[in-house]
Amino acid sequence: MKFKNTLMWRIVGVMLLLLTIIGVVNVMITTSSARKYYQETTQQLHSHVAEHMLIEVQPFINGEVNEEALGKIMHSMMAVNPNLEVYLLSPNGEILSHVVLEKEVRLGNVDLAPIEDFLTSDRSSLILGEDPRNPGEGTIFSVAEVMNGDELEGYVYMVLASEQYSSLTEALLSSYFIRNGVITFTFILLIALVIGGVLIFLLTKNLRVIIQTIRQFQEGDMHARIPVKKNDELALVGRTFNQMADTLLHNMDELKQVDALRRELIANVSHDIRSPMAVIHGYLETLHIKNDDLSAEDREKYLSIALRSSERLQKLVNDLFELSKLESNQVEMKRSAVKIDESLTSTTDEFSIIAKEKNIDLSYVLPENLPKVNADLDMIQRVIQNLLENAIKFTPESGHIDVKAASVSGGVEVTIHNTGSEIPQEDIPNLFDRYYKKDQTGTNKGAGLGLAIVKKILDVHEARIAVESDATGTSFAFTLPLAS
């Protein structure tokens, strides 16, 4: 197995990607939070610096900027704290004087809105003002009003973090948090890999069992099944596979059985076809060779035997075609309201002659005014013919065949009973199987297509046929629905 192709390592890869994204985002959020914390702390600690400066010096004398005194105190404060940048603003925010290092001042005016917010608030939250040397960037500041009595002369505006200091602080913060973030992330990643690997291995155990079972099934072990112990998604997959495997195995067994029965049918039909063909060929050959030596009586006898054999062969072929059409739904059924008693009477009369030849008593009992049924008359007549033919075939000499019809709930029931040997109960379900060849006496007498045709015709009529057999004989009964 190639590890790079396994689900476990793909999950590990996804987990590593997620951890990396989380780590990078965490470092960015932590750095931003630390920067904000530093700015807010610095501003709160130095919020009164501008006020203290006013105690030391008077920025304006007679409305004019006190440049000399202001310059000294500004330089003194910047010497103590090089991070400071000091500006003297007019009441409308114009920069009147400033003391900064190196870089020039780019703004001539400072926005007064942050200044007013600072002066009117309790200074508990961060307020960023304009940085005259870096337009568009906010900076922490301290500010104090310069008053002359009740008149506002201007503002002392102090930037608490110079550009150089801000750049250095930013670099140190980024370096510190990135360095610590990498160390922390690596440590957490190693722990997560170990714990995650173990957990993923345990969580994918059932999946590996499923894969192994499917491979066994693929390699020919049709009885391989997935053990299902829980009720989660993988258990659902296991149950679904097991059901599919059971269905597939059942279908394969049925196909094997059908194939075996098909071969058996071919053997039986071949036997049934060969027998009459052999008889026909034998007697015709005899007539051809010994025609001049045979008497007229013998020639008539041989021709009659050949004719009966050809009729038997023709019937077998017709039965095969009829059954094939019924099984492939190629027969068009013409149902209508018909009187079943007329068909029973005519068909029974036809078969009574054949029954007499075997010394079998064939009788029927039909009540008057039987209701009409919804059926295809030609098909039902075929059912009656096949059942009577089957009854005559298995009724011993001097036996009896009784044909009855009666009204029942929702239809008309037809029963054909013949005396003879009892059919074993385990054989009854197979009587209508076209491949079943065991007859009522336990011997083989051909393919037995007549009852298979009966079953198919009654199936298309949505009618059920029942079989009962005991020591006195066998009964076949079916019920046809009433015509509406």
Image (cartoon, rainbow, N blue to C red):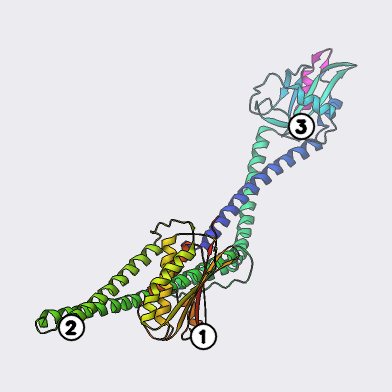
Q: Viewer-nearest of labels 1 and 2?
A: 2
Asked whether, in this view, residue 50 is left or right of residue 306, the answer is right
Asked whether, in this view, residue 323 is left or right of residue 209, the answer is left
Q: Say what secondary structure mark 1 lies in.
A: loop
Q: Viewer-nearest of labels 2 and 3?
A: 2
Q: Say what secondary structure mark 2 lies in.
A: helix
Mark positioned earlier in the residue sequence (2 or 3)? 3
Categorize mark 3 by other alpha carbons within 10 Å: few (<14), some (14-19), many (20+).
many
Is there a contact, CB below 8 Å, between mark 2 and mark 3?
A: no
| x and y percentages locating residue 102 in the rendered image | 64, 28
Q: Give amino acid for label 3.
A: Ile
Q: Give amino acid for label 2.
A: Asp
Q: Is residue 436 magenta?
A: no
* Residue wearing tag 2: 298
**In the rendered image of this protein, does residue 459 appear above or below residue 309?**
above
Q: Say what secondary structure mark 3 lies in.
A: loop
Asked whether, in this view, residue 239 is left or right of residue 302, the answer is right
Q: Residue at (34%, 69%) from the top-left corner? A: 319
Q: Which mark is residue 127?
A: 3
Toward the left, the furthest residue is 292
Q: Quadrant of residue 318?
A: bottom left
Asked whether, in this view, residue 143 is left or right of residue 287, the answer is right
Q: Residue at (45%, 77%) from the top-left corner? A: 431
Is there a contact, CB below 8 Å, between mark 1 and mark 2?
A: no
* Residue wearing tag 1: 472
**In the rendered image of this protein, does residue 162 appear above or below residue 257?**
above
Residue 18 appears in view: yes
Q: Viewer-nearest of labels 1 and 3?
A: 1
Which stretch did the figure color magenta?
Answer: 60-75
